[in-house]
Amino acid sequence: MKVKNAEADAEAKYLSGVGVARQRKALVDGLRDSICFFSENVEGVGEKTVMDLLLLAQYFDMLKDIGDNKSTKVIFTPYSSGHGIDEQVRDGQLMSSNS
């Protein structure tokens, strides 16, 4: 019985990993398609600008989700006009994961 439970647990973890991998692939594929579509259809906009725009949209979605969560007490978001938004969001995520 222990062996069967261990095998079932291993299979569940494997399938969970496959699901996460597929989710990440879908996200990357969607981002790539969005960047290509935007870059091709909006003149003068490069891939970096599109990535910054997508990252900023995700950042605002995250802030909304945090604001909607009743258990959220405080969130600190760094800001500096000398750095790109991508660096600021990444730094903020790193700071929050180290707290």
Image (cartoon, grey):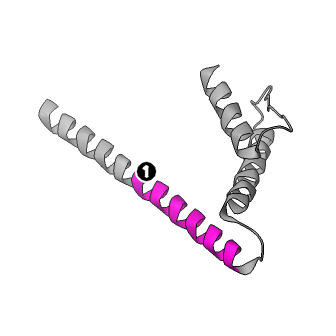
Q: For the view shown, which residue lies furthest in the right direction?
A: 81
Taking the spot 76% from the left edge, 30% from the top edge, the residue there is 72
Toward the viewer: 40 or 31?
Answer: 40
Magenta residues span 20-40
Please name the amino acid that badge 1 sits on.
Val
In the rendered image of this protein, does residue 55 appear above or below residue 9? Answer: below
**What residue would you read off at disc 1?**
20
Q: Main secondary structure of the magenta part?
A: helix
Residue 81 visible in rendering: yes
Which quadrant of the rendered structure holds the C terminus?
top right
Taking the spot 67% from the left edge, 27% from the top edge, the residue there is 96
Residue 49 in which image quadrant: bottom right
In the rendered image of this protein, does residue 16 appear above or below residue 28? Answer: above
> In this rendering, would 10 be left or right of 18?
left
* Magenta-span inclusion, residue 27: yes
Name the element at disc 1: helix
